[in-house]
Image (cartoon, rainbow, N blue to C red):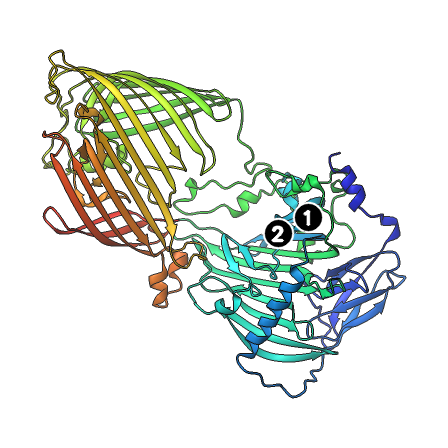
Amino acid sequence: MRFFLLAVLLGGTASSQTTVEGLVTDAQTGEGLPAATVRVEGTSRGTITNRDGAYSIEIPAGGDTLEVRFLGYETARRAVPASGVLDVALAPAVASIGEAVVTAGNPAENIMRRVIERKARWQSGLETWQADVYSRQTMSADGQIIGVIEGQSTAFWVREVGFREVVTAKRTTGNLSAIPAEAFGAAEQTINFYDDEIPFGGYDLMGPTNPRALSFYRFALEGRRAVGTDLIFDLSFAPKNPLQPGLQGRLSVLADADALIALEARPSGAVQFPLVNQFDLALEQQFASFGQSIEGEPVWLPVDFRMVASGKPGNALLRFPDLGFAISSRFSDYALNVAVPDSLLALEGGRAAVDSASVARALPVAGVVPLSMEEERAFAEIDSTRSFTEAIRPTGPLARFVNIGVSGAPGDGGSRPRGVRFGFDPAAWYNRVEGATLGGSATVRINGHRLTLEGAYQTGANDVALEVDGSVRVSESVYAGADVHRDVASLGQSIFVERSTNTIAALTGGEDYFDYVERRGARVWIGRYGQAASSLTVNAWAAYDETRSASVTSDFSLVGDLAPETVSVLDADRWIARTGGSVRIGSWSDGLNSGLTGQRAAVVRFEGGRLNTAEFSDIDDPDGNSTYGRLEGEVRWSQPTVLRRRLLAPTLHLRLAAGTATDGLPLERSFGIDTQLAGLSSFGALRARDGRMLLARQYALVAWEHDFRSVPFELFGWRGASPRGLSFQIHGAHAWATGSPGAFVEPSVVHHEVGASIGAGYAIPLRLDVTYRLTDDPGFVVGFGIARLF
């Protein structure tokens, strides 16, 4: 009942209206004219024809004449028939153009300059508008329709917030019937090409009437036509810079009104989408003033919006069906500068509300764009047993790793399940201390609470490693937890090397990347974990560990001879009690794939502890007790630099990190600086330094990379580089570190490197890195990494 009053205010009475339907055709050929406009003369009540030229329109009380228009044809006016059926044949317009007037400069730019200036005048007085909007989305796979969605709404446009709307009717094919009504906002599926900025598929494309359009687009006058008494200019347009994403196509301008009345466009060649080949998209829209004006200035508003898209997504490893998508929308019954209900302006989490009483009358209703024969057949034949997900499911070697679902559709995903959930993740790895290890973790989750038991059998070290880890949900975003462990831990914290990555190096005769220590202990923690990418995460913890020396337990290698090997060897057993915490803003990602996407985040970590040892050489304390402090900060930042309108714009990536500690820092709590491992590296590591992780008591690191994406290849004319994901980068890293003399912490390190990389693309998501080391035995180092995707 929330919108009952709104429904009364906006709803009409069907008894006072009649419906007229028919065909609009070419008078010479008899072919149907798609997207011809049919309007009740003297009103903004109107519709468009479908692809076959069919239309249906409701005639309000007092309406007695229909006006039928199609660009390039003479306008027809017909009396509303009592029978309710009216076919209209339009005659092609005969051009009758007088002598051209020569003006200085580019005539097309002069025309568009007047359109832009005229738009600024009437837009300045337009605060809101209201309209009845109908939209239909048709999806296909391999040429066959797999789903249709129809929605009708009372839409409001508000200058400050954009669209708000009330869904009044909806209909889908049976396989999409569970999609919630809030998702059927018709206006939200459309584009107004009179807007300055055109959002599309993650791009912000400049509109052709943007105040800066004359510097961005190249306009050319293609011709002039006289349609009745109206003079129409036909203009072509395209971005001046072929590397800048934008629109290209044709505009029709009504000369006397300096108004854009029609547009046919496609995205320019720089509009590309990852993993989509042979992408094709056609966009069309018409505008009319409907006799409405503000302070004497006619206001030009959308009559319709039409889009037809197709593409071949995937590659050799992941193949999808050929997909198609079409939208057909019509706008009717405009009212300008109306009051917008406060309940709509206050909507949170979406832009559409639902008039439950009206939406119960499922489409079709009178006055919407008729279905084509194929769409009619889809509604008749596609039921809930025809899964939409199955129709677009990919094939290929990587297909089993892809999870596709349609939220709310039966069997096609939906909300996260509640209650009790169980999971098991097997694990296996190898290093010279733990030996071959086989185990896994079993997890049970109950309404946000979690308990995990992790165990593994090791052929060396402890023989059996165990950890029990649990957390409870204190509130919506606050969690607390504890763990008890008996295992082998690595020294230093890596941002990209995981157990599986180190296994490859150890089994192929290389060095272990880490140094190790055996430990047993416990930890408790509490933290607030933000869900949004820019939210704040804070945690605090306390831990107690007893450690003892670790040693090599295995010298197995698949290739025979081993690289020189060292591991952590502590001279005596000891315990460490420590407390600490961290404050982080932004989303964080570690692991070998941490360089797949750009990150904007910062973190500060702090820690203090007390240890007991009689053997630690840096501590001059006869009782063997000492305290230490540790502080570390890191910033990861990604910033688009040029061609920012591109979906994947050239971007500068930065990683700035530094840490310091008191002299009493135990070896187990050393800072770690990543290097290349077995030819593999990721952003933020020292690519030109091979072998083991660097351990330090104090350090500073600056890593940078400018990803030019596919732009260098496009400059040489290779347009296919972008959808294939080819990329080019330049990069560098600069590090300084100090530590106590010993087998594992170098006294001091100064390192500088620069290099270049080529990403092989989505089919083979690897990059070739060639890096030159400027210090410490200068020279080139060749390596590989995971290619950056976004």
Q: The N terminus appears in which quarter of the rendering?
A: top right
How many numbered marks are there?
2
Q: Residue furthest bottom?
A: 99
Tag 2 residue: 189
- The nearer-to-camera label among 1 and 2 is 2
- Where residue 423 appears, as percent x and y from the top left, is 42, 25
Residue at left offset 88%, top offset 49%? 15
Q: Earlier in the sequence, mark 1 or mark 2?
A: 1
Q: Nearer the viewer, residue 287 or 601?
A: 601
Crowding at mark 1 (Cα within 10 Å: few <14, some 14-19, many 20+)? many
Tag 1 residue: 151
Q: Is residue 196 above or below residue 426?
A: below
Whether the residues at callouts 1 and 2 have beta carbons within 8 Å, the answer is: yes
Q: Could you say which quadrant of the image residue 681 lies in?
A: top left
Per the image, label 1 sits on a secondary structure element best described as strand
> Is residue 55 in view?
yes
In this rendering, position of residue 746 left or right of residue 31: left
Residue at left offset 38%, top offset 50%? 639
Q: Is residue 412 above or below residue 583?
A: below
Badge 2 amino acid: Gln
Badge 1 amino acid: Gly
Q: Could you say which quadrant of the image residue 518 lies in?
A: top left
In this rendering, position of residue 58 left or right of residue 614: right
Crowding at mark 2 (Cα within 10 Å: few <14, some 14-19, many 20+)? some
